[in-house]
Image: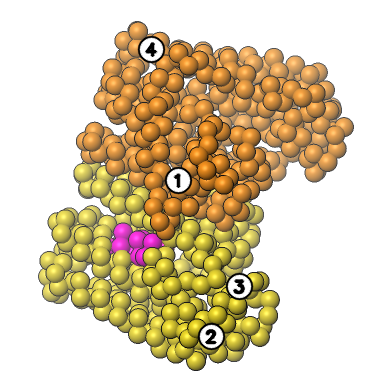
Chain colours: A orange, B yellow
Amino acid sequence: MSLDPTSTLVRPSALFERHLRETIGGAAPVQRYYQMMAYHLGWLDQQLRESAGGGGKRLRPALCLTACESVGAPAEQALAGALAVELVHNASLIHDDIEDGDEVRRHRPAVWAVWGTGHGVNVGDGMLSLAHLAMLEASASRGTSVAARAGATLSRACVELFEGQFLDQEYQARTSVTLPQYLSMVDRKTGALFGCAAELGGLLGGAGAGTVRRLGQFGRTLGRAFQMQDDLLGVWGDEARTGKPSADVRKRKRGLPAALAWECASPGAFAELCDLYAGAPGSSEGGSERVLELFAHLDVQRRARRLVVEEVDAAIDLLPSAGLADAATLPLLEFAALLSTRSA
Amino acid sequence: MSLDPTSTLVRPSALFERHLRETIGGAAPVQRYYQMMAYHLGWLDQQLRESAGGGGKRLRPALCLTACESVGAPAEQALAGALAVELVHNASLIHDDIEDGDEVRRHRPAVWAVWGTGHGVNVGDGMLSLAHLAMLEASASRGTSVAARAGATLSRACVELFEGQFLDQEYQARTSVTLPQYLSMVDRKTGALFGCAAELGGLLGGAGAGTVRRLGQFGRTLGRAFQMQDDLLGVWGDEARTGKPSADVRKRKRGLPAALAWECASPGAFAELCDLYAGAPGSSEGGSERVLELFAHLDVQRRARRLVVEEVDAAIDLLPSAGLADAATLPLLEFAALLSTRSA
């Protein structure tokens, strides 16, 4: 996704980055620990020298801050929530790379690939803990009632996120996955934290319970759409468009394309897909090519695109009843549109 | 440590275990995820059948509940804190086994050894998140001001704990470790969560800020003593008393005995210890025997014991100024005595 620099999404980012850096402190004797976090977040390179880029798109904090503005409060008021969701997201990525054995993250070696599994696990744990701390410490300025609710909202989303990671791992060991199973996984893995981001924006912005809940549903639905689009790009996106089957196909990821293929396959194609997804993924190049052929034959790409559009529409349909001023929903609509039209 | 069943420490345990089990829920499709947690906590065996034992000593919740009673409140009032610290502790153990490559925990296969590293990492993440959620949800009944402070106290302790885990890993790669370095590690790795347990007991029990702080210092100091004793038992305790050098010696753990040996070694013995601790630990049985000889020569066991006693005394000395009724400190003193006299 190439963000438009004039978009509302990147407007608060300098402030956000400054606060994020302040949250990742770390003096001796644990300085190197926090430098490993800074590496993952994109400020340091492998030699722990200042570097630029590679830190991700900061989508969840953008959603949080935009939601805060949508309820009529300055974005700054939701900074703690934005920090917390971004830290949780990045902690989960650090651990996800270990769980999947992925050595590359954002075109650079993953934390565990640089410093080993032990530090990888522990750097994620620290970042997760900092998220909870940042949420409670900073949101205390919003009153303890809001802080306690915000903290519970965050930890509930974390519980769901890791349930989703569990299902993701479980599904990789299954011969087939249904669309409802896929959705129950992505709603947890991605929907929960997107929902949390929007909910925290509303909550810290001082919105009433109904608006906060509706913003949460908006974020959750958008998160589902985002993950669907992500899975789609994982098979047919820019980075996957190398002429060869993408990593998602080679690893036989049980993502949206696979779930959709199983959903609409004939009994014969269903059984063939099961065979192709069983055994040792990636062992045969011909197998991956055949997976792509079946996807094409079953019109999976078009079906997946339609589902993404439907989910974005469903998210947008939630807004009119959220009790927001009409003009205030525009940045949220823009955010939704950006997610569904991104190509990387 | 064999706890005296008539002791105050185990009195609230049935209630605590029931609440802990309720916290670890889990219906389909994520039931197996929570069963992995239940396995680690000692209620299920590897085949996920009901089983008894192997769940640990529940020391941190006992300290939390005892601290709550010491400020004149019923133990039940601090249940959320007790749950939270026990869940954080166990999450850190699940990850610690991955970080250290330890396949056995409490005489049973570690979670990662049964279900793989991926699930191991993710089961710990879920348990950590449940800890934060349990703290905020349950302590909400104590008022949002207390809940927000309790949540921040817990996440601050988590941040410290994982800093300690970082130092633990860093030190394993060093040729020598000083006593102050060792202490800065254990104060984070163990002291922080013991301190948090006692602090939460006071806070949820409704104590004033001064008492809460003092209880925190008491717990923290006790945690340091506990870890020192643990390191001591790791070299000379019941389980280590097999005639052979213990795992801690074979793995060249940079624990209290090693730090003390370096601290009081002659230049010659210092250099020899560095050589023995460098290279591939465990590769030579003779090397481990020589480590034990040097420990004996340097009187390390007696020095370590003295340090443990000094720390327990320091903890006890904090109590008179904590603003507690004299009789109310007795269970805390009993707890401290149990820690320092345990043999396993």
Q: Residue furthest right?
A: A286
Q: Residue furthest top?
A: A326
Point out residue A134 in the picture as x, y percentages from the top left corner: 35, 41
The first of marks 1 and 4 along the sequence is: 1
Tell me the mark number nearer the camera, choosing from 2 and 4. Answer: 2
Task: Please state the chain letter of the residue tagged with numbered disc 4 in the rendered image.
Answer: A
Q: Residues within 10 Å of mark 3 (few under 14, many from 20)?
A: some
State which region is magenta.
B186-198
Contact (Cβ within 8 Å) of mark 2 with mark 1: no
Dot 2 corresponds to which residue?
B268
Tell me the mark number nearer the camera, choosing from 1 and 3. Answer: 3
Q: What is the secondary structure assignment of the residue under circle 1?
A: helix
Dot 3 corresponds to which residue?
B278
Tell me the mark number nearer the camera, choosing from 3 and 2. Answer: 2
Residue B194 drawn in magenta: yes
Q: CA distance from mark 2 to mark 4?
A: 73 Å
Q: What is the secondary structure assignment of the residue under circle 2?
A: helix
Numbered tag placed on residue A329 in the rendering: 4
**Residue in the image at 80% along x and 23% along y:** A243
**Residue A125 can be seen, yes or no:** no
Question: Amino acid type of disc 4?
Answer: Thr
Point out residue A147 in the picture as x, y percentages from the top left corner: 28, 38
Q: Quadrant of residue A139?
A: top left
Same chain for labels 1 and 3? Say yes or no. no
Q: CA distance from mark 3 to mark 2?
A: 15 Å
